[in-house]
Structure formats: C-alpha cells, structure tokens
C-alpha cells in the first residue's frame, strides 16, 4: 500500500529538453528545464522515466553533471549499445520533448562545499559525470578548497569536458591516465591506475582528504583498495560503481 | 498522468510476473556499495543478535557453519532497477538464528563490518523469508558481494540485504539506517516500488 506523499518530495516532474550536444562519440549532454526543481547537491542523481504508448515504462538513474542552477538539470549520458533507455535519450529525444524525471536522489556521494578538507576525485570513464558536478561547484564557489582529479580513460576519444578541464583555475589539478592509448606527445605511462599514480597525483593520507571514486566496478574496487592500502580511512572514501563485476 | 515518449517501445526484457514494476532483468551481478570493500577474515568473523533488553547471542564462523543450512533459490531486486532471477545461495535461515531469542521487537537494525546500517521490519526476517548467506552460486560469497556473509532478504530491495553483516539490533520502534537517512524508503517493498522516502 502506497504511503501518502511526504511534502511532495521526489514526485515525478515534467522535464523539457532544452539543449543537446555530443560530449564524445558515445556520450551526450542533455539539458532539461524541470518544473519546480528543488535544487540539488553536486554528486546527486535523478531517475528518468520513459513510457510507451501502451503504458509500459522503464526507469534509469543518471548523475547530474552540474551543480544546482535554478530549474536546470544537466545530464551526460553514455549510450549503452543495445540499451533500453539511453539510446532513446541520446538519439531519439529532441529539443522541446518532455519526459518525466524525479530527484534529487542520494545524500551520500555528495561534496559539501563547507567541508574544508582537500578533495581527491578519481574518475574512471563516464564516472567523471558526478565528479564534474563537484569540480564545477568548486569553480563557482567562494572557497578555494584544493581539488585534485585523476581521470582514467581508455584513450582521448573518451575524454569528456576536455576543454573545460584544461581551463580550470589554480587549486584544481587534473591528471590523466590513459589505459589503452595515449594522445600524441603524452609522456606518461599507458596503463591502469597504480598506487604510484595516487602518490604522485593524489593527496597524502595524512592530509585527510575527502575521496570520491566513481566508475566501472573494476576501476572503483581497485582504486578504493589502493586508497585504503595507502592509509586513507574507509569512512573518507565514498564510492559509486556502475556496470557488471569482473568476478560474478 | 504519464508522458508518452513517441517512438519508445522498450526492450521488455522483464518477465512480467516476476519482475516488479520499473525493474529490468540482468544476468550480471552489479556491485553497489557506499565505500571500499572491507576484507573480513573468517577467523575474526562473528555475528550477533542483540535484543531490545540488551541480551546478546553470538556465533563465530565455525559455529555459524555448524548450524542447519538451507539452499534458497530466489529472485533479487535492486533499487537501481536491475533484477536477477533464480539466484542460488546457501546460508542459515534467520528463523534458526532467532529461534532462541526472546523479543517483542518489531524492527531490526542490521549493522555491517564497514559501518553500514539498514533497518527492516522483523517480520521480513521470519517464516522462511531471510537468510545469513555465505555461498553464492556454489562458491564462497565474494567480498564485493558482501562475503564472507551477508543478509539475504529477497522480498525487499537489495540494499536491505546488508553486506558484511556483523550484528542485528532488535528495536521496538523503526529507526532509519544509512541509505534510509539518505532518502531511501524505510520498508523497501519492490512490488510497491517503495524506492525513496515518501513512495
């Protein structure tokens, strides 16, 4: 039996697509105007619902890529081959179309701008999306909390928000790991994230940074384990995993 | 009133009688946890049930393995929308673990070795509805999936099936656990789509 709705929270709202642009060859950034959007924190996500003519519906969760900005909700969606919802959103949905959306969801994987601790962001592939909302919140905010982002991608074709990441103000350091193929002129090693990367480009555990790790399960498991081994306390390490496991 | 998305038909990979609303079927076993995967060694493992009066029953790993085991085959449903049918487990029924426990509690807080908590109605742990599971698909439960032992409460969304479970605290009133304080539902019945507070 459904409870009565608590103060209208998390009701389904009408979202109108106002902008759509390619982020990479397989990822698309969608901007929606949402009726009476209550605002959100960087790192939170929303649920989208699509309904077919015969009433069948499907829902999926997507992270928001930007901090709160009026009625605007910005999502960067990776098209999943053979997916049920993402190909519709990225290929069929047109500016002016309306869908249903609710949120914000998730009160854990969020950056609190009033926390003075330095921030370490570890992104694997499209795991950059909620972390980018944190970076953008830091850029827009008044405090100069030191940020470091390590962004692991297969190759530069997978890079999202590239020009924006190159233009970040001081105090936000970005380093890249290419796991398959590095761009021309890149001098670093090609391969998966290693403990040495965390030493060189992360924060020492003694500085007690707030760590956010987001990406495919294998990446998150490996990165979070390295942080723990390096002395970071588990309660300071927040994770968000997606996709299948390598070990099921 | 739902908005119809022109041209959207859906893949309908569900099995309508066994897939709760809003869920899709997967053959993978996705991992969702709030933090790093803790490594819990069976030599140090212990599981306890603490009543509302403070009475405590406790089992170490070998004592737990010596209890009668069951092999449930159940469907599981994650609030992130995937469902998995006919998953096979081995574990101890909560009926067995609660059999000597004297309580008038209505709710339970499950605690994990990682500090995770989740609240459940005590009735959802009784009458063959829940297990302390330590094998999945014929193998020791992998740490990513909550090994060495986790709760298995298939009637509720899977975040209620606490990984790396260490302790159950019996409560005379409901209190929110970790995700519940972060906006998720206190009960979490997938067939009622009780995903978030207010659903």
Image: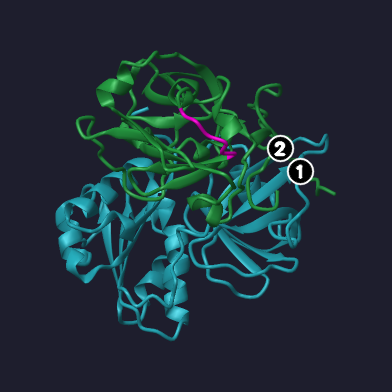
Chain colours: A cyan, B green
The mark found on residue B192 in the picture is 2
Give the image location of residue A65, x and y in percent: 51, 63
At label 2, counting other C-alpha atoms closer than 10 Å, the crowd grade (few under 14, some 14-19, many 20 or more) is some
The quadrant of the picture occupied by the N terminus of chain A is: top right
Q: Residue at x 80, y 45 (%)?
A: B4
Q: Residue at x 14, y 56 (%)?
A: A196
At label 1, counting other C-alpha atoms closer than 10 Å, the crowd grade (few under 14, some 14-19, many 20 or more) is few
* Residue at mark 2: chain: B
Q: Which residues are magenta?
A: B101-106
The outermost residue toward the right is B1
Tell me the CA gap for discs 1 and 2. Answer: 7 Å
Q: Would residue A120 appear left or right of B70 to someone viewing this image?
A: left
Is residue B187 inside the magenta stretch?
no
Give the image location of residue B22, x and y in percent: 67, 37
Question: Circle 2 — which element?
Answer: helix
Is residue B103 inside the magenta stretch?
yes
The mark found on residue A102 in the picture is none
Q: Quadrant of residue B24?
A: top right
* Residue at mark 1: chain: A
Q: Would residue B188 appear left or right of A205 to someone viewing this image?
A: right
User: Is residue B22 at least partly visible in the picture?
Assistant: yes
In the foreground, B58 or B152: B58
Give the image location of residue A159, x and y in percent: 39, 58
Residue at label 1? A2
Q: Main secondary structure of the magenta part?
A: loop
User: Is residue A188 at least partly visible in the picture?
Assistant: no
């Amino acid at each position: 039996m459904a409870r009565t709705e608590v103060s209208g929270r998390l009701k389904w709202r009408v979202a109108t697509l106002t902008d759509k642009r390619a982020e990479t060859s397989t990822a698309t950034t969608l901007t929606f105007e949402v009726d009476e959007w209550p605002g959100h924190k960087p790192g939170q996500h929303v649920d989208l619902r699509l309904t077919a003519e015969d009433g069948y519906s499907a829902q999926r969760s997507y992270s928001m890529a930007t901090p709160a900005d009026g009625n605007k909700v910005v999502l960067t969606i990776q098209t999943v081959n053979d997916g049920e919802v993402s190909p519709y959103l990225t290929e069929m949905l047109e500016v002016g179309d309306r869908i249903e959306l609710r949120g914000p969801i998730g009160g854990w994987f969020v950056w609190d701008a009033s926390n003075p601790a330095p921030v370490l962001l570890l992104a694997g592939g499209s795991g950059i999306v909620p972390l980018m909302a944190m970076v953008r919140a830091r850029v827009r905010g008044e405090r100069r909390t030191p940020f470091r982002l390590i962004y692991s991608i297969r190759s530069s074709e997978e890079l999202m928000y590239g020009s924006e990441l190159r233009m970040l103000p001081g105090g936000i350091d970005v380093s890249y790991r290419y796991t398959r193929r590095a761009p021309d002129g890149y001098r670093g090693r090609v391969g998966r994230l290693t403990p040495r990367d965390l030493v060189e480009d992360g924060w020492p555990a003694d500085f007690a940074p707030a760590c956010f790790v987001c990406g495919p399960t294998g990446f998150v498991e490996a990165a979070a384990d390295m942080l723990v081994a390096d002395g970071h306390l588990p309660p300071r390490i927040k994770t968000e995993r997606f996709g299948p496991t390598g070990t099921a | 009133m739902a908005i119809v998305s022109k041209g959207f038909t859906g893949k309908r990979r569900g099995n309508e009688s066994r897939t709760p609303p809003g869920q899709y079927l997967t053959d993978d076993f996705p991992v969702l946890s709030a933090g790093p995967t803790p490594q819990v060694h069976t030599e140090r493992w212990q599981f306890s049930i603490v009543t509302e009066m403070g009475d405590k029953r406790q089992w170490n790993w070998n004592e737990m393995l010596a209890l009668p085991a069951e092999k449930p085959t159940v469907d599981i449903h994650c609030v992130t929308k995937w469902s998995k049918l006919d998953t096979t487990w081995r574990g101890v029924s909560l009926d067995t673990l609660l059999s000597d426990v004297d309580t008038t509690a209505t709710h339970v807080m499950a605690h994990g070795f990682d500090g995770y908590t989740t609240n459940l109605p005590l009735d959802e742990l009784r009458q063959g509805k829940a297990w302390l599971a330590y094998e999945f698909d014929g193998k020791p439960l992998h740490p990513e999936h909550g090994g060495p032992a986790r709760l298995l409460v298939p009637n509720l969304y899977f975040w209620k099936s606490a990984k790396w479970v260490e302790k159950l605290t019996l409560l005379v009133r409901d209190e929110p656990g970790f995700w519940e304080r972060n906006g998720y539902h206190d009960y979490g019945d997938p067939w009622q789509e009780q995903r978030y507070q207010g659903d």
